[in-house]
């Protein structure tokens, strides 16, 4: 199966043309690539996207996030499984490694911890945060996020734009509309603050914001990426808003799993 758009068959050319743009992007290294994948493949995934994700997946119902997630490949459709196999393949990992300039070899996450299929329904949101920096099961270092958007005809006024904030959480540097067949790749560290805090307000309340989320890891990372010890998701309040960063239950679950894993290893 051909997973890439016809214009993107030579990934090495994309690396050569976009590497400098990626590593020099503000507020942290990232790239936005439109019409990257084969549209037919993505439409197949949309057609397979489960309508009952809240009952077969994970429902995040907390102050800082209102979203749905499915991270069990056994519950994916056939075409969705094949796509995940590709974006976790050596070819795609090598592409991410080279375009990002990360020296350590990137490793896929077969557990899809925190990743997989994501859905934000009417009034759903995800507040600004920096991601957990250690995989709670493997102990590997989280380095790169890759997001694939599955939203045909999505307009910015519908909400759900990905926001990238500066290190001091004083200003949103970039907003990225989650339009169909848009790939966003960015480095993640203790100060790569991002999220989609503006709630979904699609005029058709049955239309949700859908995406695919992949996280890539390495065994070791630069000390400059870290502000301290291993940590869970670090939510932040935007200036002059009523954002909430109360995640007590989520943090307790994360650290319980993390320390259990470390002991077992």
Image: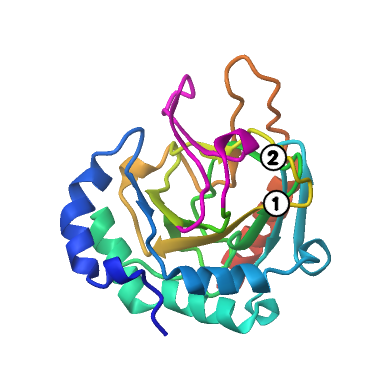
Residue 246, above or below 82: above
Residue under the image location 15 percent in, 58 percent down: 16
User: On the image, numbered disc 1 is attached to which residue?
Assistant: 208
Q: How many marks?
A: 2
Q: Is residue 40 magenta?
A: no
Residue 49 in view: yes
Q: Is residue 232 left or right of residue 31?
A: right
Please tell me whether mark 1 sits on a helix, a strand or a loop: loop
Q: Quadrant of residue 217?
A: bottom left
x and y percentages locating residue 59 in the rendered image: 78, 55
C-alpha distance separating marks 1 and 2 = 8 Å
Residues under numbered marks 1 and 2 in contact, where contact means CB atoms less than 8 Å apart = yes
Q: Is 251 on the left-hand or right-hand side of 192? A: right
Residue 207 lies, in percent from the top left, at 72, 51
- Magenta segment range? 153-181
Residue 112 x %, y % = 57, 68
Residue at the (46%, 58%) spot, across then down? 181
Which residue is rendered at x = 37% and y = 64% of the image? 219
In this view, which residue lies farthest toward the top?
A: 240
- The colour scheme is rainbow
């Amino acid at each position: 199966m051909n997973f890439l758009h016809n214009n993107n068959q030579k990934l090495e050319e994309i690396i050569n043309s976009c590497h400098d743009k990626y590593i020099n992007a503000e507020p942290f290294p990232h790239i936005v690539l439109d019409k990257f994948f084969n549209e037919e493949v993505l439409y197949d995934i949309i057609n397979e996207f489960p309508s009952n994700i809240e009952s077969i997946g994970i429902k995040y119902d907390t102050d800082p996030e209102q979203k749905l997630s499915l991270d069990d490949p056994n519950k994916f459709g056939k075409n969705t499984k094949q796509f995940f196999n590709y974006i976790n393949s050596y070819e795609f990992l090598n592409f991410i490694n080279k375009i990002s300039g990360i020296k350590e070899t990137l490793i896929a996450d077969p557990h899809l911890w925190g990743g997989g299929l994501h859905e934000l329904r009417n009034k759903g949101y995800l507040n600004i945060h920096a991601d957990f920096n250690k995989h709670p099961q493997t102990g590997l270092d989280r380095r790169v996020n890759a997001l694939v958007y599955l939203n045909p005809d999505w307009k910015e006024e519908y909400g759900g734009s990905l926001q990238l904030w500066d290190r001091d959480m004083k200003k949103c540097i970039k907003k990225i509309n989650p339009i169909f067949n848009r790939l966003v790749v960015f480095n993640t560290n203790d100060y790569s603050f991002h999220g989609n805090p503006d709630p979904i307000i699609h005029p058709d309340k049955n239309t949700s914001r859908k995406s695919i989320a992949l996280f890539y890891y390495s065994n070791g990372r630069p000390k400059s990426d870290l502000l301290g010890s291993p940590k869970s998701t670090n939510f932040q309040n935007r200036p002059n808003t009523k954002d909430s960063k109360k995640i007590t239950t989520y943090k307790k679950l994360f650290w319980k799993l993390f320390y259990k894993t470390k002991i077992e290893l």
